[in-house]
Amino acid sequence: MIPRFTFSWPIWIIPIAVLVWGFAVYSFSIPFYDINPDPEYPYLINGMNVAIGNYSNIGHLDHPGTPFQFYCGFVIKVTHLFTGEGTIASDVLGNRPEYYLRAIQASLVILHALIAFFIGVAAKKRRVNPVFIIILQSAVILLPWLFLRVNQERWLMTCSMLLTLVYIAYGLRDRRPRRFAIWSGLIMAMALATKFNYLPILLLPLLLVDTVKNKLIYLGVLAGGYFLFILPVLENFHYHIDFITGIASHDGKYGGGEERMFNLEVMKDNFTLIFSENPEIPILITIPGMLLIGSLLDQQKRIFSRKALLYFGVLLVIAVQLLMVTKHYAPNYLIPLISVYPLLLFVLYSQTEDMTGRGKFSFLYQF
């Protein structure tokens, strides 16, 4: 008897691609000190301080970056436990700093492959179409150059992938909204504590949570989780506040330039540059824009209001992210938005169906 063919194969495509590409980059990369010493080495030093429990010496709090510093500390601790030579401090700073950076780099490749795999497993259980399983997993490969880095953007990608995972597992079709509110709150707190430019993405789970009570739970977990993640560096947290204040009140990068909030000429040039380097953004804006117009015009349906709010919210997320980036532009500043592209596309299209999965875009689900 011929066994019934299933669509399990899409689950493996992206995880395998991540492992192949990630370890190819790992094998052929030049030393970090030769191409990317900043912020790789500051994170290595902070991770070493975490590994030895010297939290008072954690510096480089601009982002503030605490969750990724603790992740680096965990990897350093485990790596030293099995392959260490001498004390952690002497091994990391004196003997083999590149070795430990490579260990963190390799661990992130494995971590991203695992998260992509579990996104695929969760999506298959929710009967998502194989094509969209691959799309949902694909955030990590949208930025192949990111595999070269050991920086906070790698951890922001991790947070976005985890958000996708908990949405598919608990948030899709309001399956377990309370769990989605709690887990998404923790993940968003971790992302915000990693880098403040993730701020606009915090609105996304709020749009996907079903009731006012669960929205309040999300906000409560987000606030409490953020405090928990910055707690080890709370006594030095004023450095982060000063950094953010400087950026907000000056028109140059990192709080430099003239003391004015906006430089319209620079923002205009940056806006043009963003759209020329990221031609997909106009498409991303057009999709929720058209859906919003359609839902507002179709007032005979009683479910239009929640969908209209979602479409408007997606536009707001994009607009705020672009406003933040046009003030001081660098390609990596768009990573929070790019990392949720697959989730945004899936949410937008899935919302065009009724809650049973039957409708105009029923190809999203396999039956």
Image: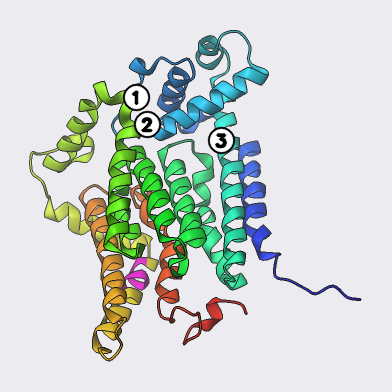
Q: Is residue 327 above or below residue 173?
A: above
Question: Residue 257, how many percent across, how many down?
Answer: 14, 38
Marker disc for residue 232: 1
Q: Is residue 219 above or below residue 23?
A: below
Q: Which residue is mark 3?
A: 105
Q: Residue at x 54, y 20 (%)?
A: 97
Q: Disc 1 marks which amino acid? A: Pro
- Tell me whether the residue at label 2 lies in contact with that at label 1, contact meaning CB atoms closer than 8 angstroms: yes
Question: Residue 166, how many percent across, how many down?
Answer: 48, 55
Disc 3 versus disc 2: nearer the observer? 2
Q: Earlier in the sequence, mark 2 or mark 1?
A: 2
Q: Is residue 80 above or below residue 328?
A: above
Q: Residue at x 27, y 25 (%)?
A: 234
Marker disc for residue 168: none
Farthest residue to the right: give it.
1
User: Mark 2 and mark 1: span between their CA atoms?
Assistant: 8 Å
Look at the numbered disc 1 and give the secondary structure of its residue. Answer: helix
Question: Residue 59, how many percent across, how many down?
Answer: 33, 22
Q: Earlier in the sequence, mark 1 or mark 3?
A: 3
Look at the image and name its color scheme.
Answer: rainbow
Q: Disc 3 marks which amino acid? A: Gln
Q: Disc 2 marks which amino acid? A: Thr
Give the extent of the magenta segment: 281-285
Local packing at callout 1 (Cα closer than 10 Å; few below 14, some 14-19, many 20+) is some
Quarter occupied by residue 210: bottom left
Quarter occupied by residue 4: bottom right
Question: Residue 21, how many percent across, how many down?
Answer: 63, 48
Prevailing secondary structure class for the magenta stretch in the rendered image: helix
Disc 1 versus disc 3: nearer the observer? 1
Look at the numbered disc 2 and give the secondary structure of its residue. Answer: helix
Q: Earlier in the sequence, mark 3 or mark 2?
A: 2
Q: Which residue is mark 2?
A: 66
